[in-house]
Amino acid sequence: MKLSKEVKNGITRREFVKNTAIKGTAAFAIGAGGMTIPVSAQSPKSTQISGKTIREAARETKVCRTADVVVVGGGPGGIGAAVAAARSGADTVLIERYEHLGGMGTGGLVTIIPAMTDISGKQVIAGITQEWIKRLDARGAADYPKKEHWGSTDKKLVDYYKNRSPFYATGNRVGYSAHIDAEISKCLFQDMMKEANVKTYLHSWGTEPIMEGNKAKGVIFESKSGRQAVLAKVVIDSTGDGDLFPYTGAAFETQIDKTLRMSNLSFSYWIDNVDLKKYEDYKKSNANELTEKMREVRKLGGTPGFLTSNLKNQQNVVWCFPRYANKSQYDVEELTRVEFLGRKEMLITHDFYMKHIPGFEKSFIVLSNSQLGTRGGRRVVGDYVVSEKDMKTKDPFKDTIAVFPNMDEKNPLMYMPYRCLIPRNINNMLVACRAFSSDAVINDSFNLIHHCVCLGQAAGTAAAQSISSGVDLRKIDIRALQASLKKQGVILPG
C-alpha cells in the first residue's frame, strides 16, 4: 500500500486510518505526544497511553483448536504430560515456544539424566524416562554404566565410571545415570508426539490461560500466525517457570537461597575435535601445572573444567557447563545479560584452551545451547507444599505418584504426592514441571530433567482420567491413577 507524504512524515493519519481499517491491512492510531501505535485491522480503535502503561484496544482472538488437554511447554515435564495424556485417551495439544521439544534436556544442553537408582543401586525412576533412554540406546545415542554394575562397590569399577563421568558413581558405589544426545532426543520426542497423536504447535509461546473465575478453560498463544487460542478441559503448565501462574490468580513463591544450585543459570556448549588421549597424558604428568592453568583461565574470565561426551562417535567432544549467578531466571533483562556474558566467556575459555591446553590445539566450538539452562523460577502454592521435612520420612504419601532417589542412608527415597501438582484454589489446572508446589530445598534437589518427566507423566495420566471419568481433578480415584502409572512402567510403592 502506498503511503501519502503526510502519513510518511507523521503529520496526519485520520484519513489513513479511515482508509486502511479493513481486514488484512494495518491501521494506525495517534497516541499521546503524536506517537503512532499499530492497531489490529480487525479492531481499529485507538490505544490509550497513560504514563507508563498502555490500555490496549479490545480484540477478538481466534480459537484454532478445542481439546481435552492442553499442555504449555514442551520440555521434560511437557513431554511426560502430553505423551501420557494422549496415550491415556485424551485429545491432547502441546504448545512449545522453541523449534524443538525437550527443553533443558535438548536445547539447554543439560544432557545428563542423573541418579535413576537409589543408594543401593536399585532402579527407582523408569516410565517415560526409561523409554526415552531405550530409544536413544537403539541409536547409540546414550551412555551409562552397565546394568550388572549398578550398586557395585568394587573400587576398580567405581574409579572407572567416575573417570568417565562424576554422575556414574556416587560415593563408593556405581549407579544408573546417563549421558544423552540432545539432537537425537529432539527427533525422538517428535516421533513420540506423532505416535501418540498429540497435536503439536512449535514456534508458539503460550502467553496466558483463559480463565472463567478460578477455572482454567484453555490457553492463548502467540506465533507468526498471530494470536490464537486453544480451549481445553484441563490446562497443564509445563513451562518450567510457571509462566501461566500470574494470570490465573494462583499463589506462587519465588524466593531462592543464593547458595542453592537452582539459583544459577547455565550457558552450555560443546567443543569438538579434542585429542583427549593427548589431554589425558598431559593431565597425568602435569597435574599441578594444569591446575594452575585452570586458575589462570578463571582469572581471565573463562571457565575451567568440562565433561567428556562418552557417546558413540563423539570421542573428541567435551561438554562445558558454566554457571552464572543472577537476580531472576524469568527477568528478560537478566536472561539477555547472561546470554551475552556466556558467549563472551565461551570464546575466552576456548581461545585459552587452544593456546595453552594440550589436546585442544585443533578444537572448535561445535554447538551452544539454544536456550539458557534455567533451574529455578516460580513455584506454585499447591494443595500440598512438599517441604524439607518430607525428605526425612520413610512413609509414602497415600497419593504418591512418583518416587525419587534421595541420597540419604536413613531415608533413601523421596515420595511425591499428587496434590503438589494442583494449584491451590484453581480448578482444571495441573503443574508438571520444576514449578511444582515445594519449598526451595525440595525444589533444588528434585527439579531435574527426569524428575520433571515423572511429574509430567503423572499429571497427563491424571488429566485423562479426570476427563474420562467426569470427575474433578481433586476427586479422581488415586488408586486407579497409581495403577495406571504402574502399567506405564512407573515404579511406585506397593
Image (spheres, rainbow, N blue to C red):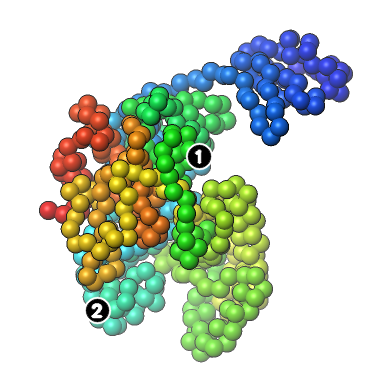
Of label 1 and label 2, which has the lower sequence position? 1
Q: Can you give x and y, in whole percent of width and height, for residue 243 in the image?
A: 47, 41
Q: Is 320 on the left-hand or right-hand side of 441?
A: right
User: Which residue is drawn at the image coordinates 41% and 38% (left, top)?
Assistant: 250
Residue 275's spot in the image, x, y percent?
53, 74
The picture quadrant where one finds residue 121 is bottom left
Does 152 sit above or below residue 246? Answer: below
Q: Residue at x 28, y 30 (%)?
A: 90
Q: Indicate the quadrant containing the N terminus: top left, top right, bottom left or bottom right.
A: top right
Position above or below: 369 against 354? above
Query: Tag 2: residue type?
Result: Thr
Residue beneath the point at 39% across and 72% down? 166
Which residue is more in the foreground, 383 or 202?
Answer: 383
Residue 54 located left or right of residue 121: right
Q: Please name whichever residue, 437 or 223, is drawn nearer the observer in this view of the structure.
A: 437
294 w.r.t. 1: above or below: below
Q: Return the x and y of residue 397 as percentages of the image width and height.
A: 20, 51
Element on which disc 2 rests: loop
| Residue linked to disc 1 | 97
Q: Amino acid at mark 1?
A: Arg
Q: Are marks 1 and 2 in contact (CB under 8 Å)?
A: no
Q: Is residue 468 visible?
A: no
Mark 2 closeness class: few <14, some 14–19, many ≥20 residues within 10 Å: some
- Which residue has dot 2 on it? 153
Q: Is residue 131 left or right of residue 220?
A: left
> In the drawing, does residue 11 fall left or right of residue 215?
right
Whole-percent x, y for residue 423 in the image: 35, 40
At horizontal 69% and vertical 18% (from top left) the residue drawn is 46
Q: Secondary structure at mark 1?
A: loop
